[in-house]
Image (cartoon, rainbow, N blue to C red):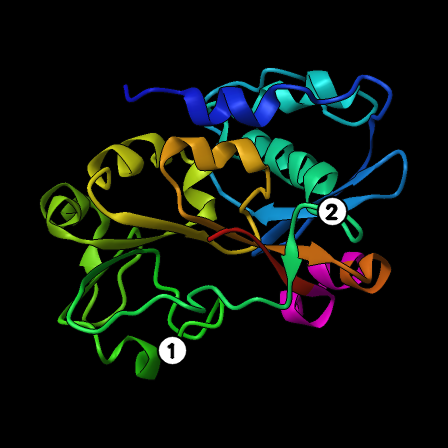
Amino acid sequence: MADMQYYEILTAGLPDKLSIARLVYGVSWTAAVLSDGRTGVAMHTIGESRPRLFTTLIGLPLCEAGKAVFSWNMEEAGEALAAINAYYNHPGCGFVRQEVKTLDGIDLAGRTVGMIGHMIGHSNITEELLRPAKNVYIMDREPKPGDYPDSACEYFLPSCDLVIITGSAAINKTLPRLLELSRNAEVVLAGPSVTCKPSLLELGIRRLNARVITDPEPMLLAIPEKRMSINAWSVPAQIGE
């Protein structure tokens, strides 16, 4: 398969002095709480056809639990990514700019845009914002009317000059191939599953637009009750140009 360097960067340097204290599951999101209280989220991704690498991530040092992001058990990989995001995407982290919209400062006029994941109405992306683009190809694993299935990535991405990728692609392991197909394009990763780790930009990504959890307790209560609104308890955080 495509190069796994993205995951190697994610897991490099995770500390052994922090551990996973708690995991919370919902229909849309998985949240992880570290032993120092930092909290992160990632998309809840269904798929347990393969056995877990660890019986549970709870109690494991973060440096160990983070390795589960390589897992082909999608539930476990989502737990690991939420824990990694808890470590990197937190209030006060000095390398991110907060309250920055996904496409601020990016001119879409006349461009061919590929969007992996139907993000219209999410991550501050609207139909009106995309209107100046010459072409917009939206590709999703569960396509809505007008979308293309995700298999269309192989055909459309090489011709795009701007590609917006949902951070959840890191969980299902499609992200390395998406980055490879988008190597001639400007690439933006967007959504609550994105990790704001500066060294990821070395892979040719222009911008990482994630979320920083600012009010974890009500969020942790809301996730299992299916009334999770990530915007209510977080702010956008971004690194890159």
Find residue 103 and report its image quarter.
Answer: bottom left
**Residue 171 can be seen in this image:** no
As helix, strand or loop, the secondary structure at mark 1 comes to: loop
State the residue in front, 216 or 227. 216
The residue sitting at the bottom extreme is: 128
Q: Amino acid at mark 2?
A: Gly
Q: Quadrant of residue 121?
A: bottom left
Give the residue at x 52% y 18%: 51
Which labelled disc corresponds to residue 126? 1
Tell me where residue 118 appears, x and y as whole percent: 34, 63
Residue furthest right in the image: 36
| Residue at x 31%, y 80% (from the top left corner) | 127
- Frontmost of labels 1 and 2 is 2
Lower sequence index among marks 1 and 2: 2
**In this view, 122 is above or below 88:** below
Q: Specify start and end residues of the magenta stretch as a single range.
A: 220-234
- Residue drawn at the location 34% of the way across and 79% of the way down: 129
Q: Position of residue 154 (x, y in %)?
A: 14, 41
Up/down of 221 relative to 126, above or below: above
Which residue does the numbered mark 2 point to in the structure image? 94
Q: Is residue 127 left or right of residue 170?
A: left
Answer whether residue 30 is visible to the viewer in this image: yes
Is residue 223 rendered magenta in the image?
Answer: yes
Q: Does residue 105 show up magenta in the picture?
A: no
Q: Position of residue 230 (x, y in %)?
A: 64, 65
Q: Please, what is the three-letter code of the amino acid marked with disc 1?
A: Thr
The secondary structure type at the circle numbered 2 is: loop
Secondary structure predominantly adopted by residues drawn in magenta: helix
Give coordinates of residue 225: x percent, y percent: 71, 64
In the displayed structure, does residue 155 sit left or right of residue 167? left
